[in-house]
């Protein structure tokens, strides 16, 4: 079975900092930023990007569809 490398892109201006996505990440990739977006919310970012498997849990739980998940097969 091929190994999969994941990556996410977060629309930080749409993220309202609800903190629903970090707990559902099985590999502890996500964390909340100390910085604020234009609306004054702490947004999510990839603290440990090398651990991302592209499982899509974060995007599924995001109520505002701020997260896009990408997967790449490693050969």
Image (spheres, rainbow, N blue to C red):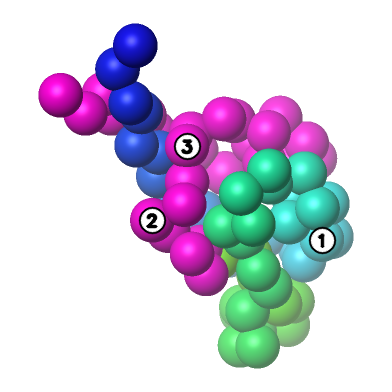
Q: Quadrant of the N terminus?
A: top left
Q: Tell me, yes or no, whether the two marked residues, 3 and 1, touch with CB atoms within 8 Å.
A: no
Task: Answer left or right for 34 relative to 45.
Answer: right
Mark 3 element type: loop
Where is 24 relative to 39, above or below?
above
Which badge, 3 or 1, is on the more N-terminal residue? 1
- Indicate the quadrant where residue 24 lies: top right
Query: Quick one: which residue is furthest to the top in this view?
Result: 1
Q: Which mark is residue 53?
A: 3
Mark 1 element type: loop
Which badge, 1 or 2, is on the more N-terminal residue? 1
Query: Which of 51/30 is in front?
Result: 51
Question: Does the segment drawn in magenta span residue 65?
Answer: yes
Q: Position of residue 46 (x, y in %)?
A: 51, 63
- Indicate the quadrant where residue 2 lies: top left
Q: Position of residue 59 (x, y in %)?
A: 64, 36
Q: Quadrant of the C terminus?
A: top left
Say which residue label 2 marks.
50
Q: Nearer the viewer, mark 3 or mark 1?
A: 3
Q: Position of residue 37 (x, y in %)?
A: 61, 78
Where is 71 relative to 65, above or below?
above
Mark 2 element type: helix
Q: Tell me, yes or no, whether the two marked residues, 2 and 3, touch with CB atoms within 8 Å.
A: no
Mark 1 to mark 2 CA distance (whole Å): 21 Å
Task: Answer left or right for 30 relative to 61.
Answer: left
Mark 3 to mark 1 CA distance (whole Å): 20 Å
Q: Nearer the viewer, mark 1 or mark 2?
A: 2
Q: Which mark is residue 19?
A: 1
Q: Which residues are magenta?
A: 46-75
Task: Answer left or right for 17 relative to 13.
Answer: right
Residue at position x 52%, y 69% from top? Answer: 47
């Amino acid at each position: 079975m091929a190994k999969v490398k994941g990556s996410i892109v977060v629309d930080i201006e749409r993220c309202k900092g609800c903190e629903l996505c970090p707990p559902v990440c099985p590999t502890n990739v996500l964390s909340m930023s100390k910085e604020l977006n234009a609306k004054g919310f702490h947004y999510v970012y990839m603290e440990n990007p090398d651990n991302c498997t592209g499982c899509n849990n974060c995007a599924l739980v995001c109520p505002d569809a701020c997260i896009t998940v990408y997967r790449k097969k490693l050969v």
